[in-house]
Image: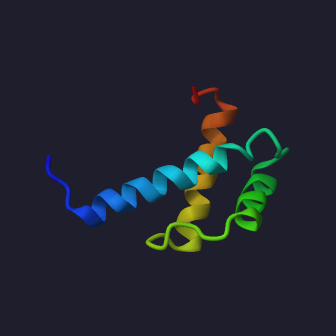
């Protein structure tokens, strides 16, 4: 599969965003606290995501953490 440069940049930006967000999982006691911590401590989210889309991804990351699906 061949991806153009823009898609590669989006994938990289998303990976960095979610990886940095993982650092807030252990510092948060609820999904609301986690999402709030991430949005308060990030200068920018990936520009191609709306706030709602970014929040949805963070909620999924929280669920994966709680379910023990993160390695």
Image x and y of residue 2, in percent: 14, 51
Residue ID at (57%, 59%): 56
Q: Which residue corresponds to the image point at 58% horizontal and 70% vertical from the top-left?
A: 52
Placement of 20 over or under 45, stated as above or below = above
> Left or right: 7 with respect to 42?
left
For residue 19, what is the image quadrant? top right
Q: Quadrant of residue 10?
A: bottom left
Q: How is the image coloured?
A: rainbow
Which quadrant, please, contains the C terminus?
Answer: top right
Residue 33 in the image: x percent, y percent? 81, 55
Left or right of 30, for residue 64? left
Q: Is residue 42 above or below residue 58?
A: below
As drawn, the residue found furthest toward the left would be 1
Seen in the picture, residue 43 relative to 37 is either above or below; the reply is below
**Residue at 29% from the left image edge and 66% from the top image edge:** 6
So how many labels did they put on this image?
Answer: 0
State the residue at coordinates (65%, 50%): 21
In the rendered image, residue 9, in percent from the top left (x then y), is placed at: 36, 61
- Judge by depth and name the residue closer to the eye, 35 or 46: 46
> Of 5 and 66, which appears nearest the observer?
5
């Amino acid at each position: 599969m061949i991806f153009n440069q823009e898609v590669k940049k989006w994938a990289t930006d998303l990976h960095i965003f979610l990886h940095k967000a993982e650092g807030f999982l252990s510092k948060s006691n609820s999904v609301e606290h986690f999402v709030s911590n991430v949005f308060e401590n990030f200068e920018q989210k990936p520009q191609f995501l709306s706030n709602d889309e970014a929040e949805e991804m963070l909620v999924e990351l929280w669920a994966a953490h709680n379910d023990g699906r993160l390695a």
